[in-house]
Image (cartoon, rainbow, N blue to C red):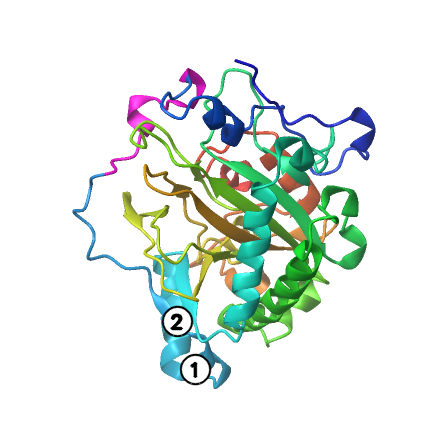
């Protein structure tokens, strides 16, 4: 059987960038040839396999924040946000202001891309030293286990970071859907940033003054069905390197799991909501008060699943480290060293997804 590997020409690489990843086969294409078998390289070690039938913790639910109440500076909702960031590192937001039509269009554009013939998708393949485009990231070894997922990653803000050679511009409606969705999500992220600034002892513009203009990147994840979902992982356990991430889930299919008090629990979808998780950069800036949390994705036998993760990040040249307002030499001494964001993100992309291994790099 010919394995269709997502190939990119060397000239697509542009300098060092954020990192690179080894080329791997498209799992979508593997399944077109054999939908029943699970290739050895995708079978996780026994200790890493998901317990698909586990339902002991179904009563646990990721906190839900009413964004319209935050906009009114409701004290109870602000307190809920603070506790969610401290105790969970994850929360779902409702009434966030992004129209349902925009979210539906974004999901449809993504679905249309992954329905394209392989040769068409491959025109958007990642470059040699790039993390943008169609393919896979965080593959650093020929021996590491692979995720049951194909993905597309695009930088969307600032505008000058967009690289349209990785966008399927001939796909009707794709560019328009991504531009509209990314613009609306940016409005939501600005409000989250303002609330986090206040919670970390600054005014609403505190993080923006400290970090400058934020970057935004969108990762579109396609999880095919799997005949043995108990053997594979859609995405391996990891925390995000962002300030925070906003995830548009499939409204019908569970797939995202977060590690809460050493137990994996489902982040059950709420239609038209967004899942928000604290990233490594906020953990560092908050001196560990708010922690980025391990999460993973699982697969299922019945129906493919898609999700769209939007990462909000500092500028590459910005130094990140604990904010003065989050350090008290007597009660809360500095726990992280300062690091330029581009150096942190390059170290992250040089490793496979491996839980919280990345934040250990900057811990004192």
Displayed quadrant of residue 127: top right
Q: Is residue 173 left or right of residue 323?
A: right
**Which residue appears farthest toward the left when viewing the image?**
56
| On screen, residue 177 above or below 4 | below
Cβ atoms at labels 1 and 2 below 8 Å apart: yes
Residue, disc 2? 65
Pinpoint residue 72: horizontal percent, then vertical percent.
48, 86
Q: Is residue 19 visible?
A: no
Decide: few, some or many residues near mark 2? Use Cα within 10 Å; few <14, some 14-19, many ≥20: many
Magenta part of the chain: 40-52
SS at circle 2 = strand
SS at circle 1 = helix
Pinpoint residue 346: horizontal percent, then vertical percent.
66, 36
Q: How many numbered circles are shown?
A: 2
Q: Is residue 112 left or right of residue 297?
A: right
The answer for how far apart the CA atoms under marks 1 and 2 are is 8 Å
Q: Is residue 311 visible?
A: yes
| On screen, residue 250 above or below 202 | above
Decide: few, some or many residues near mark 1? Use Cα within 10 Å; few <14, some 14-19, many ≥20: some
Q: Which mark is residue 247?
A: none
**Which residue appears farthest toward the top when viewing the image?**
1
Pinpoint residue 230: horizontal percent, then vertical percent.
29, 31
Residue, disc 1? 69
Query: Is residue 132 magenta-colored?
Result: no
| On screen, residue 26 above or below 151 | above
Could you say which is closer to the camera, residue 248 or residue 138?
248
């Amino acid at each position: 059987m010919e394995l269709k590997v997502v190939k990119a020409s060397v000239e697509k690489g542009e300098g060092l960038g954020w990192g690179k990843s080894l080329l791997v086969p498209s799992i979508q294409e593997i399944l077109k040839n054999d939908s029943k078998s699970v290739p050895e390289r995708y079978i996780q070690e026994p200790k890493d396999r998901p317990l698909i039938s586990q339902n002991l913790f179904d009563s646990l639910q990721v906190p839900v924040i009413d964004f319209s109440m935050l906009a009114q500076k409701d004290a109870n909702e602000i307190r809920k946000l603070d506790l969610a960031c401290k105790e969970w590192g994850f929360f779902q937001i409702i009434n966030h202001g992004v129209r349902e039509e925009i979210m539906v269009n974004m999901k449809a554009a993504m679905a249309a891309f992954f329905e394209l013939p392989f040769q068409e998708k491959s025109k958007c393949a990642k470059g040699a030293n790039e993390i943008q485009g169609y393919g896979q990231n965080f593959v650093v070894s020929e021996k590491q286990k692979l995720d049951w997922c194909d993905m597309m990653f695009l930088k969307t803000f600032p505008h000058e970071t967009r690289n349209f050679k990785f966008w399927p511009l001939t796909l009707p409606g794709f560019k328009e859907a991504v531009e509209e969705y990314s613009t609306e999500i940016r409005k939501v992220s600005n409000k989250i940033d303002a609330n986090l600034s206040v919670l970390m002892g600054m005014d609403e513009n505190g993080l923006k003054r400290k970090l400058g203009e934020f970057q935004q990147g969108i990762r579109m994840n396609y999880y095919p069905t799997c005949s043995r979902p108990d053997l594979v992982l859609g995405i391996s356990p990891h925390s995000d390197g962002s300030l925070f991430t906003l995830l548009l889930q499939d409204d019908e299919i569970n797939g995202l799991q977060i590690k809460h008090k050493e137990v994996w629990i489902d982040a059950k979808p709420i239609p038209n909501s967004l899942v928000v998780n604290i990233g490594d950069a906020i953990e560092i800036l908050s001196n560990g008060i708010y922690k980025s949390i391990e999460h993973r994705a699982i697969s299922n036998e019945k129906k493919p699943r898609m999700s769209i993760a939007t990462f909000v990040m500092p500028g590459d040249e910005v130094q990140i480290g604990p904010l003065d307002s989050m350090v008290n030499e007597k009660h809360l001494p500095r726990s992280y060293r300062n690091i330029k964001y581009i150096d942190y993100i390059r170290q992250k992309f040089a490793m496979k997804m491996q839980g919280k291994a990345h934040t250990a790099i900057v811990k004192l």
